[in-house]
Image (cartoon, rainbow, N blue to C red):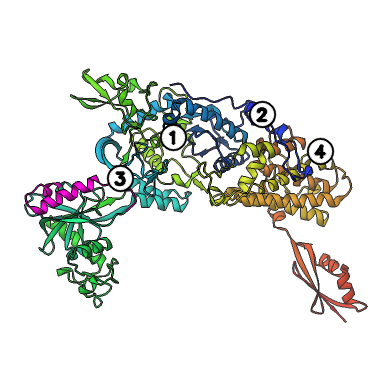
């Protein structure tokens, strides 16, 4: 298989189709020649290597990364929110003097390409290459600034060679193993699904109900890192709290006690994990998962109860189990008793469908009075209930009341009752005492349980990285030697969903000698979960062409953790958790010097249309291509940012795009129409420090100049704060307000300005600031206007403007004018007027003059920036 590469990023052919005719009703005066200058500036950025930092010698580094996409063929405007947001941040950091690394690649393996091959007969490599080329053209047409020299694709053998190398690393460290376990199985796609790929009990790709199957699979032992993954969440202070909560819940640490219940006729006790040891005296039965080894042994005993147990287990295994669904509770008494180690009471052992073999030990002590699921099961089968926890010592409910329909289990902490020597203790104290006593007596031990399960990486499909293992009858599972990597996918494969990997039918692929003994052996035919590919790609971007190692430590230690990671909240659990896990494995192996891959995370909301997430299946996608052709890339970018807070879902409105287009038209006309009315000398300087005190030609000399300069500096302050907080929609609002203020100022002048006039200098300052501030959002028009203002360098080689706090703080205020205590006028005036200026404005107002009349002004009371009271008589 060949390396996937798309066309040259510098080519103007990537600009998209020619512009369409103006939209009906569009005002012609809004037009600006985007079709002429947008492709020219994209080519200029590529030629000048604007987004290609010297990764070996960064002065001030900034690694901005968008989650790399699956090459599905075409992008819609909803996808653009993620990438445009990242581009704004990258350009903003460039203007702060950072060396910015902003690469792009392709999460190119996966089920959709293989399903397409089954339907169309087109090989996944061919469809993937075609889709990458199409999507790359769209990304370029948006004006996104990526270092395309670093482009990677996970389906490239030179990439998945190192994915296989990572498998071998984990295998050497005891973190990759083969075992049998329950998996999510889609009978339509004929493959294992990750939990994330199961939505409401069905396959997210085809909506087929998902089954649970027991299969021999390969796993990564992520549970060995559960505590570290949990603890290090506290260090991720620049992650959304909801994402950290989701990860905490997914890891699901539970501290409790493993209690040993002696079983009649068994040499070994049944070990049950519980977080509520304080309810031990209320355990009236035990429950085994149908897959528990003890359940199989009890079912093999003689007698009718054992036979019924065997039949129940067989029926359970033949039933389709939907992930996330809880079927009606069913169970069977095994006919065997165990002993409660606290009370010595004989209690029955049941097998039931509501206990999972993957939780705890696969066996639970059932306390129906204090656990709702046990309560429902006990009520169904008439099993006794015993109250052992009460809200307080005097409020223990009557156990007989538990049989009434309105009563439910009491699951809160409280005071222990009817609990032998522990009666009267609080729940917390009782748990500690019981744990200590049971450990001392050898009846149990403190333990930690996790919801997190080991990472199942096997997939019975073709389009993925082959697992580098060879199975030998003599030597077992033998790792492929590193010198023989990559294990390349064969080309001649028949794509048909049989439930087994298509690689099993390619004898030339799987029939190999054992690397250890040389005897005939069989290559592993399962491929790896695509989450493995995406768990380390952010490291490969630093040295994508390196054929000697997956990444260079000196580079990744210099550039990582990623300064800003951006992607959808749908990846908040598995992708991020797996990436964190792999990073910690690399750290432990001495391959890098940090333990978390992403310092800051932003999860953008979805763009919706007609009230639903954009989706081809819903028929509500909006293609950016036609919009870019009709309105320009900057318009589409700006509207995408302006549509709403980027962290929240937002509704796309095709008509509203026109308003954004008109705004950019006003920006264009404001600069172009008034270019000859402002001085040629730049006001901002380099680096720009706007309005620095002591520059006499910038000192305000009129109210209009004062108001304009306040707008300029206040806008710099607002946009800077908003971009730092990623409030990009409000930043665009601030730019619109400033454009309106500057246009009003220019229109009010009415006559040509001389280059030495303060008003001309203030207007130039306002326009320069506007172009600089709009640059990250609408980069093409900013570049063109910056050049038309007489600047020879790229606007992105300039420094981000800095506001003058005093000028930004000044504002137009409402000055209330009273005559003898009665309000006669409210005047708009600049803040900071002197007492003389305030008095003069008040006396000059016609309404005040009429109120004063011929009377003498005996006293003037001035409250600065608020009130002028004239006392007349």
Other-residue count near label 3 (Cα within 10 Å), few / some / many at <14 / 14–19 / ≥20: some
Nearer-N-terminus badge (4/1): 1
| Residue at the outermost front position | 119
What is the x, y in percent for residue 600? 49, 45
Instruction: Identify the residue shown where x is 86% and y is 50%.
Output: 749
Q: Is residue 314 magenta?
A: yes
Residue 352 sits in quarter: bottom left
Other-residue count near label 1 (Cα within 10 Å), few / some / many at <14 / 14–19 / ≥20: some
How far apart, in angstroms, are the residues tagged by discs 2 and 1? 36 Å
On the question of residue 653 being in view, the answer is yes
Residue 788 sits in quarter: top right
Residue 430 sits in quarter: bottom left
- Horizontally, residue 751 falls left or right of residue 154, namely right
Name the one closer to the observer, 239 or 84: 84
Nearer-N-terminus badge (2/1): 2
Q: Is residue 840 magenta?
A: no
- The residue that label 1 is drawn on is 112
**Label placed on residue 44:** 2
Q: Nearer the viewer, mark 3 or mark 2?
A: 3
Other-residue count near label 2 (Cα within 10 Å), few / some / many at <14 / 14–19 / ≥20: some
- The residue that label 4 is drawn on is 680
Other-residue count near label 4 (Cα within 10 Å), few / some / many at <14 / 14–19 / ≥20: some
What is the x, y in percent for residue 311? 16, 49
**Label placed on residue 453:** 3
Nearer-N-terminus badge (4/3): 3
How far apart, in angstroms, are the residues tagged by discs 3 and 1? 26 Å
């Amino acid at each position: 298989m060949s390396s996937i590469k798309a066309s040259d990023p510098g080519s103007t052919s990537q600009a998209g189709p020619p512009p369409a005719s103006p939209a009906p009703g569009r005002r012609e005066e809004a037009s600006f020649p985007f079709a002429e200058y947008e492709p020219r500036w994209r080519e200029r950025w590529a030629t000048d290597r604007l987004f290609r930092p010297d990764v070996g010698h960064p002065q001030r580094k900034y690694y901005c990364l968008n989650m790399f996409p699956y090459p599905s063929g075409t992008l819609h405007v909803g996808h653009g929110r993620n990438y445009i947001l990242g581009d704004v941040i990258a350009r903003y950091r460039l203007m702060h003097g950072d060396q910015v690394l902003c690469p792009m690649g392709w999460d190119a393996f996966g089920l959709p390409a293989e399903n397409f091959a089954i339907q169309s007969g087109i090989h996944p490599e061919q469809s993937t290459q075609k889709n990458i080329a199409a999507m790359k053209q769209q990304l370029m047409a948006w004006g996104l600034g990526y270092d395309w020299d670093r482009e990677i694709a996970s389906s490239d053998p030179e990439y998945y060679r190192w994915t296989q190398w990572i498998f071998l690393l984990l295998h050497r460290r005891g973190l990759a193993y083969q075992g049998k376990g329950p998996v999510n199985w889609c009978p339509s796609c004929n493959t294992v699904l990750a939990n994330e790929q199961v939505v409401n009990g069905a396959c997210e790709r085809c909506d087929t109900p998902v089954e649970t199957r027991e299969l021999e699979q390969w796993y990564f032992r992520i549970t060995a890192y559960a505590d570290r993954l949990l603890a290090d969440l506290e260090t991720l202070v620049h992650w959304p709290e909801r994402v950290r909560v989701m990860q905490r819940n997914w890891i699901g640490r539970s501290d409790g006690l493993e209690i040993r219940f002696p079983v009649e006729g068994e040499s070994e006790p049944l070990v049950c994990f519980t977080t509520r040891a304080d309810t031990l005296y209320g355990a009236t039965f035990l429950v085994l998962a149908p897959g528990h080894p003890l359940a199989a042994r009890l079912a093999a005993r003689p007698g009718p109860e054992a036979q019924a147990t065997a039949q129940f287990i067989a029926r359970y295994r033949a039933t389709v189990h939907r992930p996330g669904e809880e079927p009606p509770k069913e169970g069977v008494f095994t006919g065997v008793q165990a002993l409660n180690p606290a009370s010595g009471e004989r209690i029955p052992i049941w097998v039931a469908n509501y206990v999972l073999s993957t939780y705890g030990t696969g066996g639970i002590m059932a306390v129906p009075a204090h656990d709702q699921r046990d309560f429902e099961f006990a009520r169904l089968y008439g099993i006794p209930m015993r109250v052992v926890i009460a809200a307080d010592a005097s409020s223990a409910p009557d156990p007989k009341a538990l049989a009434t329909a309105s009563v439910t289990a009491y699951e809160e902490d409280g005071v222990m009752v009817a609990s032998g020597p522990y009666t009267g203790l609080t729940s917390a104290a009782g748990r500690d005492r019981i744990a200590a006593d049971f450990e001392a007596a050898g009846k149990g031990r403190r333990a930690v349980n996790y919801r997190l399960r080991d990472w199942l990486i096997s997939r019975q499909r073709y389009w993925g990285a082959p697992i580098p293992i060879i199975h030998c009858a003599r030597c077992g599972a033998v790792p492929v030697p590193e010198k023989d990597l990559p294990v390349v996918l064969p080309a001649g494969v028949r794509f048909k969903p049989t439930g087994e990997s298509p690689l099993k039918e390619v004898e030339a692929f799987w029939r190999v000698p054992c690397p250890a003994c040389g005897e005939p052996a069989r290559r592993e035919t399962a491929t790896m979960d695509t989450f493995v590919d995406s768990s380390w790609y952010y490291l490969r971007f630093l040295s994508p062409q390196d054929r000697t190692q997956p990444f260079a430590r000196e580079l990744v230690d210099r550039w990582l953790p990623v300064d800003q990671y951006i992607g959808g909240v749908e990846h908040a659990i598995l992708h991020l958790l797996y990436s964190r896990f792999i990073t910690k494995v690399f750290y432990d192996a001495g391959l890098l010097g940090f333990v978390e891959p992403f310092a800051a995370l932003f999860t953008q909301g979805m763009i919706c249309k007609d009230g639903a997430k954009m989706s081809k299946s819903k028929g509500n996608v909006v293609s950016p291509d036609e919009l870019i052709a009709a309105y320009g890339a900057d318009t589409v970018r700006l509207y995408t940012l302006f549509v709403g807070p980027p962290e929240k879902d937002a509704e796309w409105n095709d008509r509203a795009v026109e308003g954004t287009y008109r705004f950019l038209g006003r920006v264009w006309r404001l600069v172009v129409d008034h270019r000859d009315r402002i001085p040629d000398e730049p006001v901002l300087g380099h680096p720009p420090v706007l309005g620095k005190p002591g520059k006499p030609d910038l000192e305000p000399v009129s109210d209009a100049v004062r108001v304009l300069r306040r707008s300029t500096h206040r806008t710099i302050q607002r946009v800077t704060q908003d971009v730092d907080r990623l409030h990009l929609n409000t930043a665009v609002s601030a730019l619109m307000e400033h454009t309106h203020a500057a246009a009003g100022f220019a229109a009010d002048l009415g006559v040509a300005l001389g280059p030495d006039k303060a008003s001309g200098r203030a207007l130039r300052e306002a326009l320069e600031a506007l172009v600089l501030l709009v640059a990250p959002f609408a980069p093409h028009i900013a570049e063109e206007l910056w050049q038309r203002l007489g600047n020879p360098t790229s606007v992105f080689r300039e420094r981000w403007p800095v506001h003058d706090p005093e000028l930004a703080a000044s504002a137009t205020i409402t000055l209330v004018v009273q005559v003898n205590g009665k309000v006669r006028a409210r005047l708009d005036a600049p803040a900071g007027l002197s007492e003389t200026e305030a008095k003069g404005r008040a006396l000059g107002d016609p309404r005040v003059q009429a109120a004063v009349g011929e009377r003498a002004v005996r006293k003037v009371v001035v409250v600065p920036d608020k009130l002028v009271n004239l006392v007349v008589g």
